[in-house]
Image (spheres, helix red, strand yellow):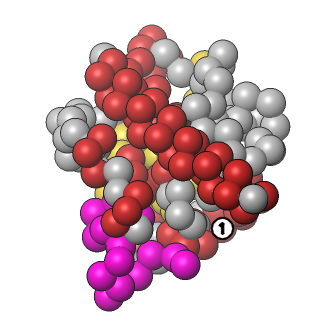
Amino acid sequence: MSFSKTNPRFCPKCRLAKIHCVCEYFELFDNDNHLWLFQDPREKKKKNNTGYWATQFLSNYSYEDENLDGLFSKLNKINPEKVGILLPHNNSIELNEKNWGNRSELVVLDGTWSHVQKLLKIYDFDENHQFYHISGLKSSFEIRKPPFEGAISTLNAISHFYKTIENFEELEIKVQSLLQNRIKIWKNAKVKKKD
């Protein structure tokens, strides 16, 4: 069963069934770099919506899982030189403080790899924006086969960005704990199904 705002069995904050609530892991960080989270609408139906969970850790963000056109329209008013897209790409460069420079707007596209590629084409992100990738980071949330070697969850990528650029080491620790909790629950559920 997927999240529903009207279903009292779900936590309205983490969007999980209340018996699996992870709100205890959330801690708010005042981030300087604004997060723009474009989420494929199909993601909100998933139990492990790690992209959405990122918004529960950050005070400075814009998030949309339905009106993506409106969100892109707002982003389009910002100088592209201030924007960086965190996504492996043909022209992406390594994420570090030097390469990030004076940018202040972080764009993250959340969805399956094929859905993210469609979002890239629909909104022409390729035109004027710099892409960034993360090297050498193993995903903390491998509950399915990754689309390519080095692929990590949206929440992993976002927390690593803020650790690298804004020194939020505690954020990454909190995220690791949350994801480990979810993996434990997922593994236990698989064992019960076999039994």
User: Residue at image x 28%, y 63%?
Assistant: 13
Please give the residue where the numbered disc 1 appears in the rendered image. 122
- Give the x, y percent position of residue 45: 54, 73
Q: Residues within 10 Å of mark 1 (few under 14, many from 20)?
A: few
Q: Residue at x 37, y 62 (%)?
A: 19
Residue 58 magenta? no
Residue 35 position (above or below residue 3): above
Could you tell whether 152 is left or right of 29 in the image? Answer: right
Q: Where does residue 68 sit, x and y in percent of width and height?
A: 48, 71
Give the residue type that dot 1 points to.
Ile
Query: Which image quadrant for residue 128?
Result: top right
Q: Is residue 191 above or below residue 10?
A: above
Visible residue check, residue 112: no
Question: In screen coordinates, is 51 left or right of 193?
Answer: left
In depth, the one of 123 and 166 nearer the eye is 166
Please provide percent x and percent y for residue 178.
42, 39
Pick whichever, 43 or 130, lies toward us.
Answer: 43
Screen quadrant of the C terminus: bottom right
Left or right placement of residue 96 versus residue 189 in this view: left
